[in-house]
Image: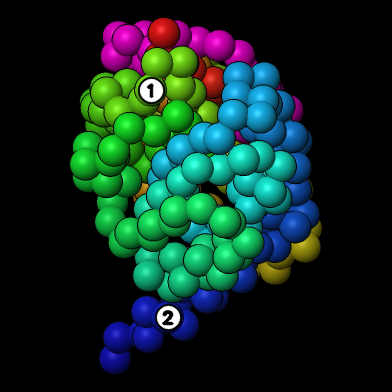
Amino acid sequence: MTANPAIQFFHVWDTYAKVVSGDYMFHRELSVAVSAAIRSRFADQAIRILDLGCGDAATFAPILQEFSIESYYGVDLSAAALELAEKNLAFLKCSTQFQQADFVTALAKSPQQDVVYISFALHHLQTSEKAEFFHQAAKILSPGGLVLFVDVVREEGQNLKNYHQHYCDFVQQTMINLNKEERDAICAHISENDYPDPRSVLCKLANEAGLKLVSSSVPQKWHQLIVFERP
């Protein structure tokens, strides 16, 4: 018998909510850095935002409350997540769109945006697919627009197998508010689905796409915000 997709989603999302609540992936610190990056570029300007892999938008919503938003476009593969995102962003007094799609396809079809925000999603793609992401992002960004890239990255010189091993050790040792079954499930997901690149590779891919490094925030070696702009 196949499990109900909605039940599967909420089981996984409950685990992720515990990770966010415990700040195990440094969401608080990274959110502060994201807010500062937007403010330093756009101040009181009304901005158009594309949120790729938006999930329930729970961590991004408080940031959006700080700014004048002209339009918000959220994309995720999960219909259940998008329903939650729509509720969490009901306060927005602007044009909103929520689309169930993979973010690469949505990015290629997006109208021009001032901010492309992607949080803990790009590491699921292979390096060549990340290159395509940056090329598409550069195409749809307005001049001076930003890519706000929040994600896990590998250390320089660290191979993927070593990263998986060490990150799973990190999960088991630090995520103490999760039970063993939840921690094991996270580690299985990491080993099967995560392909983070080192920062130097990501910057090279972005540069080749015509994007320029602006700033970064590194609250912990694997968890970073890297900000790129379209000159």
Front in this rendered view, residue 149 or 88: 88
Q: Quadrant of the C terminus?
A: top left
Gap in angstroms between the C-alphas marked 2 and 1: 37 Å
| Extreme-bottom residue of the structure | 1
The residue labelled by disc 2 is: 6
Q: Nearer the viewer, residue 204 or 189?
A: 204
* In this rendering, position of residue 115 left or right of residue 127: right
Please provide percent x and percent y for residue 138.
32, 21
Q: Which residue is mark 1?
A: 142
Say if 210 sits above or below 179 in the image.
above
> For the residue labelled by badge 2, is the local secondary structure a helix, a strand or a loop?
helix
Q: Is residue 84 left or right of residue 26?
A: left
Q: Residue at x 39, y 60 (%)?
A: 98
Residue 223 visible in the snapshot: yes
Dot 2 or dot 1, earlier in sequence:
2
- State the image coordinates of residue 50 (x, y, percent, origin top left): 42, 41
Which residue is found at the position 50% from the left and 10% from the top? Answer: 213
Where, quadrant-wise, is the N terminus in this rendering?
bottom left
The answer to whether 67 is drawn above or below residue 20 in the figure is: above
Q: From what the image shows, is residue 66 above or below residue 79?
A: above
Q: Position of residue 2 (x, y in %)?
A: 30, 86
Q: Residues within 10 Å of mark 2 (few under 14, many from 20)?
A: few
The residue at 75%/48% (across/down) is 23
Q: Residue at x 66, y 29 (%)?
A: 44
Q: Specify the amino acid type for callout 2.
A: Ala
On the rendered structure, is 138 left or right of 154?
Answer: left
Closer to the camera in the image, 6 or 113: 113
Q: Which residues are magenta?
A: 204-223
Q: Is residue 114 magenta?
A: no
Q: Residues within 10 Å of mark 1 (few under 14, many from 20)?
A: some
